């Protein structure tokens, strides 16, 4: 697998570490149903067979966090962008 | 027909034409009492025990490919019950007891070989952890023996005991553990279920689960609609996809686990040996090939194949305990889709949808659990109550905080 980093260009996936699927931002702890929302946020996953939005860290390169759209059926990388532009 | 020494002798004389089909390749009927989705080991074992133990036979097992074409044919055939947590031990030990009588039960040679499973430890802290696990096992009536350095040297003298970084100090041995023939397990359960009237339907992919007023009314398949009021899911790596057809989100991610086998060599490895400082486990098949595997791929995948960096890492683990492995050539490697739960322990439970039962989240350890999983899932579907041995494997344990802390790593690959 190769990932095209916006800074470093086309690089081998071994240079990167994957955190996991992009599950969005933390729920509001003050919400009345915060407990339910947190258990969903921490434990439940969409786990799609197809394009999946993931967070990858380019540890052996520019050390930036990337948001990678990758097809889980073929491992094809569909899009890469900076996670925190 | 019943297999026996006599039938084998007759078969040798009369030739292959005398052996009948082992099970029917059924055409689906329009309706069943129970539909099991997934014709792997767990699904077929469930159907078998539903028929055998609970007397329910109007059952279909739906398989999208051919039976045993998924993880049942892609594992490393290890059976063991060396777990630590009270929520896990009873299920795996129930499985082990069923393994011990499986050939007689099924009248099928599943090649269960209790050749022992040895987990190596490499430090004082790890020895303490293993002693604790061994004690937990023995409290639950499971066999466990803590070997010191000399004990392991007698068991497998060729290991790299004085490795500079991970010296081998001893190991936790479960003598009743070992291996079984995975294809035979699938076929044995299929044959047993089929003879009791269960329909095994191949090339029948479920594309939808029909739910009315909160309860299941049937499944849409590639071979037409099948009406039923009870659906049991045993689809391993595809759990999330099938559960989503009923509107459920699961605490599961799908990852690839790879395994590989070397060229055949003379008998070398007495049982199963696992590395304690990395992820590597190895055994020797009856054909002589060394079968080994290691870690999951870090990213989600449904591809049934992995990448080379993980193969390299697994081989490095092997070289760290058994340097002679470097002289062998790997013949082939393969990958399976593992349904990794967030705490690393499986789920056998009802779902919020009436008549829909879930069996999954076996991570990379489902094969050893095949008999017990089928037994407990059949119990749940037939009686609507959780089996005592699987009472902790609840679907809602994540929301209620009753997660099972066996290894505390779940789907997070960097913790393995």
Image (cartoon, rainbow, N blue to C red):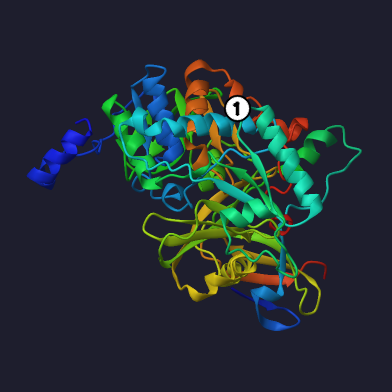
Q: In this view, does A79 lie to the left or right of B219?
A: right
**Residue B405 location in percent, x, y?**
74, 39
Q: How many marks?
A: 1
Occupied quadrant, residue A17: bottom right
Q: Which residue is drawn at 61% across and 28% down?
A: B90
Instruction: Identify the chain of the residue marked 1, using the numbered disc in the image.
Output: B
Closer to the camera in the image, B310 or B290: B290
Occupied quadrant, residue B413: bottom right
Q: For the view shown, which residue lies furthest in the right direction?
A: A30
**Residue B296 location in percent, x, y?**
61, 58
Q: Residue at x 68, y 67 (%)?
A: A68
Q: For the view shown, which residue lies furthest in the left direction?
A: B14
Q: Crowding at label 1, few (<14), some or many (≥20) Cα neighbours within 10 Å?
A: many
Label 1 sits on residue: B390
Closer to the camera in the image, B240 or B19: B19
**Residue B202 location in percent, x, y?**
32, 42
SS at mark 1 in the image: helix
Q: In this view, does B234 lie to the left or right of A18?
A: left
Q: In this view, does A15 lie to the left or right of B238?
A: right
Give above or below for B407 relative to A67: above
Give above or below for B117 relative to B266: above
Q: Is residue B299 visible?
A: yes
- Which quarter of the image is occupied by the N terminus of chain B? top left
Occupied quadrant, residue B33: top left
Q: Which residue is drawn at 73% across and 64% down?
A: B166
Q: Which residue is drawn at 65% across and 39% down?
A: B83
Q: Is residue B224 visible?
A: no
**Residue B273 location in percent, x, y?**
57, 54
């Amino acid at each position: 697998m190769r990932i095209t980093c916006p800074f470093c260009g086309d690089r081998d996936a071994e240079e990167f570490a994957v955190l996991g699927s992009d599950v969005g931002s933390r729920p509001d702890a003050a919400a009345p149903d915060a407990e339910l929302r947190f258990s969903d946020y921490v434990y439940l996953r969409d786990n799609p067979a197809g394009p999946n939005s993931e967070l990858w860290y380019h540890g052996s390169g520019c050390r930036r966090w990337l948001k990678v759209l990758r097809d889980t059926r073929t491992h094809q990388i569909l899009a890469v962008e900076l996670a925190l532009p | 027909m019943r297999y026996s020494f006599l039938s084998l002798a007759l078969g040798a004389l009369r030739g292959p034409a005398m052996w009948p089909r082992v099970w029917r390749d059924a055409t689906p009927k329009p309706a069943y009492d129970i539909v099991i989705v997934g014709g792997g080991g767990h699904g077929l074992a469930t159907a078998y025990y539903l028929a055998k133990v609970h007397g329910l036979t109007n059952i279909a097992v739906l398989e999208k490919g051919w039976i045993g074409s998924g993880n049942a044919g892609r594992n490393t055939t290890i059976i063991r019950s060396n777990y630590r947590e009270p929520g896990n031990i009873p299920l795996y030990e129930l499985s082990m007891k069923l393994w011990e009588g499986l050939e007689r039960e099924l009248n099928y040679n599943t090649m269960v070989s209790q050749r022992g499973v040895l987990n190596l430890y490499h430090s004082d802290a790890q020895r303490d952890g293993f002693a604790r696990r061994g004690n937990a096992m023995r409290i639950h009536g499971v066999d466990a023996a803590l070997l010191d350095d000399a004990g392991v040297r007698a068991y497998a003298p060729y290991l790299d005991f004085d490795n500079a970084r991970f010296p081998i100090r001893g190991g936790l041995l479960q003598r009743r553990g070992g291996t079984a023939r995975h294809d035979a397990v699938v076929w044995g359960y299929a044959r047993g279920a089929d003879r009791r009237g269960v329909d095994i339907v191949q090339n029948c992919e479920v594309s939808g689960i029909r739910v009315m007023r909160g309860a299941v009314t049937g499944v849409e398949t590639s071979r037409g609609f099948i009406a039923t009021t009870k659906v049991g899911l045993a689809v391993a790596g595809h759990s999330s996809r099938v559960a989503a057809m009923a509107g459920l989100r699961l605490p599961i991610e799908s990852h690839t686990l790879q395994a590989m086998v070397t060229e055949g060599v003379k008998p070398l490895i007495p049982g199963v040996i696992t590395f304690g400082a990395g992820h590597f486990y190895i055994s020797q098949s009856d054909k002589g090939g060394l079968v080994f595997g290691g870690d999951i791929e870090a990213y989600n995948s449904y591809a049934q194949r992995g990448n080379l960096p993980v193969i390299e890492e697994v081989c490095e683990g092997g070289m760290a305990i058994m340097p002679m492995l470097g002289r062998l050539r790997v013949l082939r490697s393969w990958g399976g889709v593992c349904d990794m739960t967030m705490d690393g322990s499986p789920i056998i439970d009802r779902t919020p949808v009436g008549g829909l039962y879930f069996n999954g989240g076996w991570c990379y350890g489902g094969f050893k659990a095949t008999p017990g999983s089928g037994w407990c899932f059949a119990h749940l579907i037939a009686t609507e109550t959780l089996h005592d041995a699987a009472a902790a494997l609840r679907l809602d344990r994540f929301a209620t905080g009753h997660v099972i802390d066996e290894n505390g790593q779940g789907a997070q690959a960097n913790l393995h």
